[in-house]
Amino acid sequence: MADEAEIFSQLKQAVMEGDEDVAVAAAQAAVAAGVDPQRAIIEGLAAGMAEMGRLYEREECYVPELLVSSEALYAGLGVLRPLVIASGKAEKKGVAVIGVVQGDIHDIGKNLVKMMLEVNGIEVHDLGRDVDMERFITATQETQADLLCLSALMTTTMIAIKDYMPAFKTQLPGVKIMVGGAPLNQQLADEWGADGYGENAVEAARVAVRLLETK
């Protein structure tokens, strides 16, 4: 019987290779071996997707590879997530609204962050791309979200985040606000009053969990 480390490696590799069948088989092997399904998700499937995100940022893989990897990720989740829920370990860490700001249609990074938030137990409401800034406010209020995640990939669109930060703070009291995207950095996030910044999808998920734990 395969040990945990081998199963985690198989899950990670299945996602990186975009092989749904292997992802399902490895997930089933994890179940048969009595591996904690939550650990299998985080240390196997999510680790594979995180690595693909890093490769994408270094331009060592491209959008088609990311898409097939995400399909493999969700195939494995289909086996493991119900077991996490049944075990009672699927305590929802919080609710997040995520989207790409108005005028910006680049959403690969946002999609990676969404996946990483979901596998970390956060309920995500995805508004998509080119989202009107007022829509972020209404959606956050409607879903009673704890976290608002704003993505901008162009210097011309990221200014909307700065301009709307006072409105977010006023109309969404108690909501943590995260920002991310290529032209942004920790310094700008701090200057604009954001609660968190994610340099990449893995870091964004880590920061999001920390912010939700401190609410």
Image (cartoon, grey):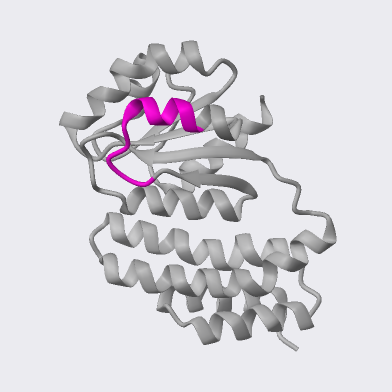
Question: Camera-side residue: 96 or 21?
Answer: 96
Visible residue check, residue 114:
yes
Q: Quadrant of residue 145?
A: top right
Residue 61 visible here = no
From this viewpoint, which residue is outermost toward the left?
Answer: 156
Check the image and report above or below for 91 versus 150. below
Q: Residue at x 54, y 27 (%)?
A: 141
Residue 118 relative to residue 135: left or right: right
Q: Quadrant of the N terminus?
A: bottom right
What segment is highlighted magenta in the picture? 128-139
Number of labels in the image equals: 0
Say which quarter of the image contains residue 57.
bottom left
Residue 8: give x, y in percent of width and height: 62, 72
Magenta run includes residue 138 = yes
Query: Is residue 43 found inside the magenta-colored segment of the image?
Result: no
x, y percentage for residue 84? 75, 62
